[in-house]
Amino acid sequence: MKKVIAATLAVAAAVTLMSCGGVKKSAEGKVFNVYVWNDEFPSRFKDYFEAKGKVPAGVTVNFVQTPNADNAYQNKLDEVLIAQEKAKADDKVDMFLVEADYALKYVDTPYTMDVKKEIGLTDADLAKQYKYTQDIMTDSKGNLKGVSWQACPGGFVYRRSYAKDVLGTDDPVKVGEALSDWDKFDAVAAKAKEKGYFMLSGFDDAFRVFSDNAKSPWVKGNKIVIDPQIERWIKMTKEYTDKGYNNKANLWSAESTQGMTKDGKVFGYFGPAWFIDFCMDKSASGDWAFCKGPQGFSWGGTWICGATGSDNMNLIKSVMLMLTCDTDNMTDLAKGAGDFANNEVAMTAVANSDYGNPFLGGQNHMAFFLENAKSIDKSAMSKYDQGMNEKIQSAMADYYNGNVTLDEAWNNFYTSVMELYPNLTK
């Protein structure tokens, strides 16, 4: 279904929107439609844009929310973008969000407006953003097609009380030293097991650490490529499962979330700032801390796109400037919401301030992100990332659970991805 929708999107874009001749300049509309999949961006918009008096009088902001599950959000977005040219003014998409795993699906289409040439942001406006966040949204002709308020370097979030029990300290620097490479991480996992804790909740916890460090894209030409980092994740996860170092949970499952509750027994989780803020159970608030972990990585991110055909160009520009370029506002956002903001000047200031995150026991964890954020490299991204990531995790879960052999798991993976992407070969 995904491949059919993607093909329809591309063809419809080429046929119907090329006739528009770009963005039509007109009076600003009175309804501002923003397509999202959860409450994250609406909350940022409300607290750091609307609350600052930036929504013009008489304009109604309408967030159209469709959950990500089962590709529902992308399906809805594709449906309305294909119908954009003929939609009534108040029904048109003005702005929509995309995630890293499928951003490239929308970047190289006429549905997304050029941030500089059409929306009007300048190089000076964008200068403080992390380069990788722009690289992801740059099309094949060098046009920037979206911007983000967040950068997403990741690290390891661990339970303070469990670290004291296992390592004799909960200090982020000392715990970070004890977990600074994978051999050390494995040794602590063994100690944690002896104390009755799971080092990780399950199979997928470390996946993004390894996949983000892959040097090769999933596909070269039409050939599927397996990077050594993916093979390393499989080997480690199988060992952790067999040795009882994880709780055999799948990502986003109830079992995984239970491990982070007050009575949960999981030592820690890999994640970026948004994972801490939006995904972690808060019942053990204050008993968590953050360190870099064995390997730097990034995970995810959300980008704001201006939709071609919008009649709210000035408002789109204002949102992008205020939420992704304004240093003072992004400093407030980082301190108030816990985001690692997409502004190096702002984040350096926060890292060197007296900011403390209550969930992390008052720790200023932003300093741990800074070095990692500067080195993020997304050159191995491809338009196949979402499907590949989902299918490899699904296929290998059966192997970790002992239901199939490794060879059978690989065969199942190749079968599933070639059904999803018929143009690919082993």
Image (cartoon, rainbow, N blue to C red):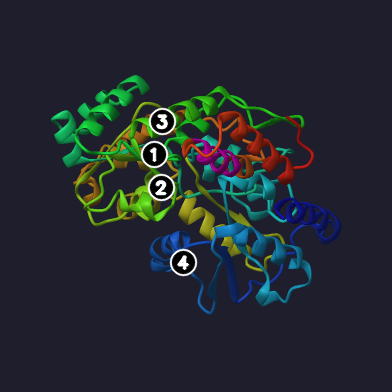
Viewer-side residue, 79 vs 125: 79
Alpha-carbon neighbours of circle 3 within 10 Å: few (<14), some, or many (≥20)? Answer: some
Residue for point 55% across, 43% down: 394
List the residue tagged with mark 4. Answer: 54
Residue for point 70% across, 75% down: 89
* Three-letter residue code for mark 1: Val
Sequence-wise first label, 2 or 1: 2
> Is residue 395 found inside the magenta-colored segment of the image?
yes
Determine the image quadrant of residue 161. top left
Q: Are discs 2 and 3 less than 8 Å apart at CB?
A: no
List the residue tagged with mark 3. Answer: 372
Q: Are discs 3 and 1 less than 8 Å apart at CB?
A: no
Alpha-carbon neighbours of circle 2 within 10 Å: few (<14), some, or many (≥20)? Answer: many
List the residue tagged with mark 2. Answer: 327
Residue for point 59% across, 75% down: 31
Instruction: Specify the quadrant that holds the C terminus.
Output: top right
Sequence-wise first label, 1 or 4: 4
* Three-letter residue code for mark 3: Asn
Viewer-side residue, 86 vs 258: 258
Can residue 339 be spotted in the picture? no
Q: How many marks?
A: 4
Label 2 to label 3: alpha-carbon separation: 20 Å
Q: Are discs 2 and 1 less than 8 Å apart at CB?
A: yes
Q: Is residue 73 above or below residue 242?
A: below
| Secondary structure at numbered mark 2 | helix
Viewer-side residue, 305 vs 121: 305
Sequence-wise first label, 4 or 2: 4
Magenta stretch, residue numbers: 390-399
* Three-letter residue code for mark 2: Thr
